[in-house]
Image: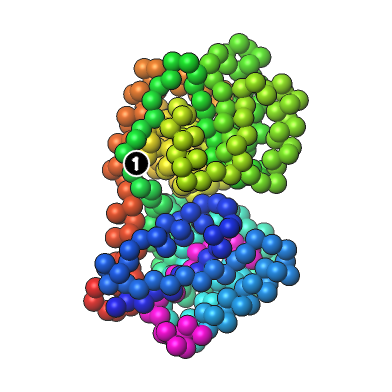
Amino acid sequence: MIKVLMCGNHPSNKGGMTSVIAQLNSYDWEKRNIKMKFIPTYYPANNIIKAAYFAVAYVKIFLEFLVWKPDVLHMHMSYKGSFQRKYLLHKLCKKFGVKDIIHLHGSEFEKWYYETDENTRKKIKKLLKECDAFFVLGEEWENSVKRIEPNTKTLIVRNAVPIPSRVVFWNKEECQVLYMGVLIPRKGVKHLLEAFLKLKQSGRLMRMRLAIAGSGELEKDLKRLCVQYELEDCVQFYGWIDGQEKVRLITESQIAVLPSYNEGLPISVLEAISYGMPVVATNVGDMSAAVKDEINGYLIEPGDAEQIAEKLELLNNQMKFEQMSKESRELAEREFSEDKLFETIADNYVRLSGKDK
């Protein structure tokens, strides 16, 4: 039996990393002769509580190293404080001879690297060079990591989603555009509201409406902007949704949109294409792996509200929608099924442990 200890965000933390952790935690690893344990190392709170929470988690992991003796520590990391926590755990792995995997989720990791002080950069390069495997979400991320430390043992492990039995359908009454994600500046949701304002002012809005599913620091500002733009009749905020509520909102929508300034390979986009949704998204990170321009959606430049408006107007057409919907579903089935994700990760657990399956 291969023993794997995984660590990362507490389930209460919202975002893509937490979704991936939940996905891995819910899988039946024992059918692959792998025993998985999970210890959360980050809890969303003030700095004192976060530090205390990690200190307790560190002791738990230390005790697991002493008693349970895992073969592999699988760490989910973004940047800033997340890096500092994983660096300490990496040093612990070296002391105990435990193989470690860093699973990168922070889309601004390279940008942050060049903003840090020299001492932190040295620690980053050391971690990248010494860790036994470094999972990235796509080619662009692999290139950015290699620019920092060419000797990093990178492996592309794309996010994946379960393929649902249902797909979205054209609605003759309205065309609902869906945004799913946290409401922070990097996501560019302000430009999405600007795009709807342009559509309304130019008489191109017609039957389109916008559903915003998410929460975050900009929620109040975006709601105020919605009132300022007089878009209350065509924009609705749903807050953070999950489970059956998310499924309902997705299947009631026709088009997904993600106007981010920076991304990796977002779970929200993969979920959208798995239901056959055409997508309008910015051409950042590895978005082009899931959104093929003019095939199952449109890739645009960040910050361009007029481009968002133009592409949404093009998709507000039954023939175009149905053509791109079919392409989205086929791409999801071909490239982003969970089976491929679990197989890749399991193979790496086996390789690093030195044990047979």
- Kindly tell me whether residue 177 is visible in this rendering: yes
Q: How is the image coloured?
A: rainbow
Quadrant containing the N terminus in the rendered view: bottom left
Quarter of the view holding residue 349:
bottom left
Q: Nearer the viewer, residue 91 or 52?
A: 52
Q: Position of residue 53 (x, y in %)?
A: 64, 72
Q: Nearer the viewer, residue 114 or 14?
A: 14
The structure residue drawn at horizontal position 58% and vertical position 44%, both measured from the top left corner, is 240
Q: Please provide the residue range marked out in magenta.
A: 63-82
Quarter of the view holding residue 278:
top left
Q: Specify whether residue 65 is painted magenta.
A: yes
Circle 1: residue type:
Pro
- Identify the residue position indicated by label 1 in the image: 164
Q: Position of residue 75 (x, y in %)?
A: 48, 68
Q: Nearer the viewer, residue 149 or 44?
A: 44
Quadrant containing the C terminus in the rendered view: bottom left
